[in-house]
Amino acid sequence: MGMKLMKCKKGVFFTIIAMLIVAVIVAASTPKSQLVYKDRLSSAQSRIDTANGFSETLRAAYMPTALSTSSYSALNSLSEYVKVRGSLFADETELSKAFSEMLMNGTVECSPGSHQTVEECICGLQPGYEGCTSGSITLMKKSNLTQRIRDVEKAAKDTLQLETNISKDYGKFDVRLFQNDETGPFQVGVNITINYSVNADIAWWNGTDNITAIFGIGGIEDPMYSVKTRGAAQLAAGEFYTNKINESNITSWNVSSVFRLADSRRYKHDEQAPSFLNRFTLSEKASACCGIESLINPTSLPKLFDADGNGGTSGEARAYADWCFLGARCPPETAGALWKVSCVSKTTAGQKFYNLTLDSYHASSYNLTGSEVPTDYIYSGDADPHAAECDQLMQEVCAIDPDTPCIP
């Protein structure tokens, strides 16, 4: 799926190059409304207009688009890389360094001091990875920003006879990867500084510009899942549990919507949770602007649980919010309590969402307790106090999912 997505983006990218060239030629040959031309433009003036239009389009349209598509490919490739490597980055500084190299060159420090293409690195670490045997693996091939720059430089020379040069020293690009209030939790921003020149023989343009791209992260595999669901045996066997980032459209929370969130494996914003970028690291920091979480779906990840529905790194009972279940940090709990969810946490082993558990913070944030509901829809022990009401409480999803805990 990841390789098909990259091929699709590559096709869109080259279409943009063609459109850019055509748009500049048309713009250069179109009379300007402010001026009245009595005679045909001189070839020199026409060439200046063409070069000027190209220069403007290069920095205002082409480079932001190239930065966006290459950055998405770089994050997707880093997600695949840490999954196969089996370990996350130490912190966001280390992530940013690896991202800069991947963005500009499509390479990664596969082992200390050894920099390889991400495809070579992944296939060396996991020869059975999709596409490695056939040689068809494509993650950053012709998708890195340096290649994008070479493509437009060649197109400008071949089509417009313009000598174009954009600095390719990624150390001078000052690449900055970020999430903040502007991006929100389901987008990522990248800022770079470019030095460029356009030479039309009779005139010359050069400049330095800051380019920013903000793009969605939908479809990229969550590195927290890919790495933290793997023990030594799974690592050796090349087994992966993955979950792709996709935003939930649920905005109102109750028993049935908690079920639907776990069932869909989608993500919602939570200010206590780590951001998408932080999920590449071991730091597990809360992010008020950009934290995201999903609820662990035990049906999709069965090997993470023991016979009693417990899980985590030590097999102990823990909350099913993904960063609580897979990580070492969770919000303070009321009296250390863990709760089951009425009508969702089935009491019989083997049934869907058996023992789905939440901590007190999440029980409250999902509107399962407190003054907003007539009764607390959480419980401890084995007896669900609302078992007789499940048909009514789950009516939103009973009709579309035969596995929901509905009364026959």
Image (tube, rainbow, N blue to C red):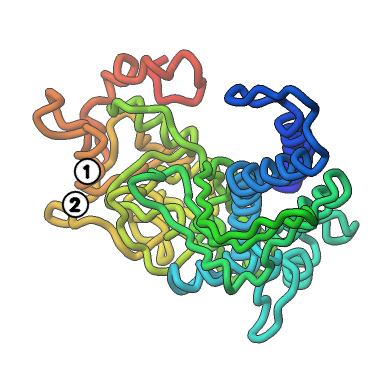
Q: Which residue is mark 1?
A: 380
For this view, does 307 lie left or right of residue 2?
left
| Residue 11 placement (x, y as % from top left) | 78, 39
What is the quadrant of residue 12 in the picture? top right
Q: Quadrant of the N terminus?
A: top right
Residue shown at 44% from the left, 68% from the top: 92
Above or below, 164 relative to 214: below
Residue shown at 32% from the left, 51% from the top: 319
Above or below, 299 relative to 41: below
Q: Quadrant of the C terminus?
A: top left
Q: Which residue is mark 2?
A: 337
| 2 or 1: mark nearer the eye | 2
Q: How many marks?
A: 2
Amino acid on which the number 2 mark rests in the picture: Ala
Above or below, 191 relative to 115: above
Amino acid on which the number 1 mark rests in the picture: Ser
